[in-house]
Image (spheres, helix red, strand yellow):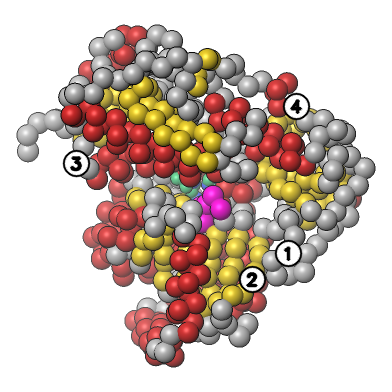
Amino acid sequence: MRILLLTHSFNSLAQRLWCELGARGHTVSVEFDISDEVTHEAVALFQPDVVLAPFLKRAIPESIWSQYLCWVVHPGVEGDRGPSALDWAIQNGEPTWGVTVLQAQAEMDAGPVWASATFATRAVKKSSLYRNEVTEAAVQCVLNALERRQSGTFTPRQVSGQAHALMRQSDRAIDWATQTTAQILARIHAADGFPGVADALFGEPCHLFDAWPEAQLRGAPGTLLGRRATAVLRATADGAVWIGHVKRPESIKLPATLAFAQADALPELPLAPWWKAGHATWQDIAYSEADGVGLLDFEFYNGAMGTVQCQRLRQAFDFAASRATRVIVLRGGADFWSNGIHLNLIEAASSPADESWANIFAMDDLAEAILRCESHLTVAAMHAGAGAGGCFLARCADLVWLREGVMLNPHYKNMGNLFGSEFWTYLLPARVGPEGAQRIMQRRLPMTAAEAVHSGFYDECLPGAGFAESVLRRAGQLAESADLAERMAAKRAKRQSDEAAQPLAQYRAQELQQMQRNFYGFDASYHIARHHFVARSPHSWTPRHLAIHRDLGWNSPS
Ligand code: COA
């Protein structure tokens, strides 16, 4: 079928649908929902069988839905209608929630239902629920709906329901004196990563994001108790909550301790490096061991890794490599494995070019430490997706295992034609061949876990259910395997012969020479693209590589 994805942006769900539908032989094109006029032009050019709207911020115009079959992916159970669907579900503590694919018509989310699915919710950030449960359910629903459409016998059902209102900041407000940790967490989770909860820190207004529970420390409700790395700790009625990120008026989202200089005066509340704390708290880097395996978790907000985070992670990796274990598993964070250098910190720096340079150096140092590790077999276990440099950082490990359904963007050019580093010029062609590498870099398209393994870039795709357990089991088996010494010898020999062919230092220098042009050269594309990315500027056009209906002669028989 010919499917037009009409979407506010090419977000993770739109990317996943694009991949899944394309893999099933459908012809998929994308148009961003910029204006009715642009949408009319797109449908006229593409003549879609279905207009599929995975992520819209406004209604589809009647002139479109009255002429074309239009499906809206609504992140709510059957009968749920209106905006802020997930926000209400999380804030109200719904134990189960769902996704519905509805046919668009005059009243928002009130059209006939083509498919629906439910899932058990978790007490996590909205963005996390969206990237995991909602996305899986949405893919399932869209595939079911397409099957039903193709069967020609299915009649979508009209379902009665009640529309809820847009959640306002007054609905989200926190009362630190009376609300418990669980209540406050639910509020901040329901508003993460947009719009955040309007509140104040140090007496100044800001929106709160990235909250974590604290099980041991407490104080007078509402007071700030201390800081740890990038987060501040605030007491609730029955405990305390860590606030990792804030957005101050007229600013971008930043780590709380950077956004407020006043945080310097708070007492530092350190944890012993790098061992995982035995109680609930905020810990961005946590090391633990099981069955001869070292496990390194790094929970960086949005997968963004700033200069200091890369340096600290490198220290933690060195620590892991100093232990008497045999395998190190790099597990990343719950929502992203890594998205490369920290574009918000770079944007906020007094010299974004200097900060970009420092960040990529620290990232390359980390990548090099993993590549040069001779004491352990290393595994990147990707429970969550990765983008740009994060994809190549994972490939520095000897083995990469991914959870089925994870989305990857192993390219850099979408960020103002960035060349990229993290040794990609060494790692990618070796796995997919020089032409394959060029294709991946030039096409700038997302890839599913299955595609990444099929192309040879990564090693194995594991089922979503029980992913963490199978990683532990497999890593334990590797650590105990009779041929581990042989494997390690082969690994060292391979590194030596690769080094003789072309030293890592040379790959790094060549990549950084290009990056220096991106950061300091006269072409400011990277700085402009980064600015729009961190400011979340609305799109004014759809990238041509996504809008295939805009290619001349796209539809003519070849
Ligand atoms: N630095 C800072 N913030 C980042 C980031 C980075 N490298 N990568 C992602 N983010 C943030 C986004 O700004 C967004 O912030 P929000 O909480 O305000 O919404 C959040 O992470 C989620 O990103 P989003 O783009 O909405 O997620 P997605 O799943 O749709 O797309 C990517 C994932 C990786 C494709 C996309 O985020 C991306 O292209 N990131 C930039 C990668 C990059 O160029 N890195 C630098 C070169 S190494």
Per the model, the C-alpha gap separating discs 2 and 1 is 9 Å
Q: Position of residue 423 (x, y in %)?
A: 43, 66
Q: Residue furthest right?
A: 220
Q: Is residue 337 magenta?
A: yes
The residue positioned 25% from the left and 41% from the top of the image is: 22
The residue where tag 4 is placed is: 173
Mark 3 vs mark 1, CA separation in Å: 48 Å
Pick whichever of labels 4 and 1 is earlier in the sequence. Answer: 4
**Residue range of the region highlighted in magenta in the rendering:** 334-341
Asked whether residue 400 is in view, the answer is yes
The residue beneath circle 1 is 277
Q: Which image quadrant is residue 54 in?
A: top left
Give the distance between the C-alpha atoms of the residues marked 4 and 2, in whole angstroms.
Answer: 37 Å
Disc sitting over residue 25 in the figure: 3
Regarding mark 3 in the picture, which secondary structure is present there? loop
The alpha-carbon separation of the residues under discs 3 and 4 comes to 47 Å
Q: Name the residue under label 2.
A: 288
Q: The residue tagged with tag 1: helix, strand or loop?
A: loop
Crowding at dot 3, Cα within 10 Å, few <14 / some 14-19 / many 20+, comes out as few
For the point 29% across and 36% down, the residue is 143
Mark 4 belongs to which amino acid? Ala
Q: Is residue 479 left or right of residue 278?
A: left
Q: Which of marks 3 and 1 is nearer the N terminus?
A: 3
Q: Where is residue 397 in the image (x, y as percent from the top left)?
A: 46, 71
Mark 4 CB within 8 Å of ligand 1:
no
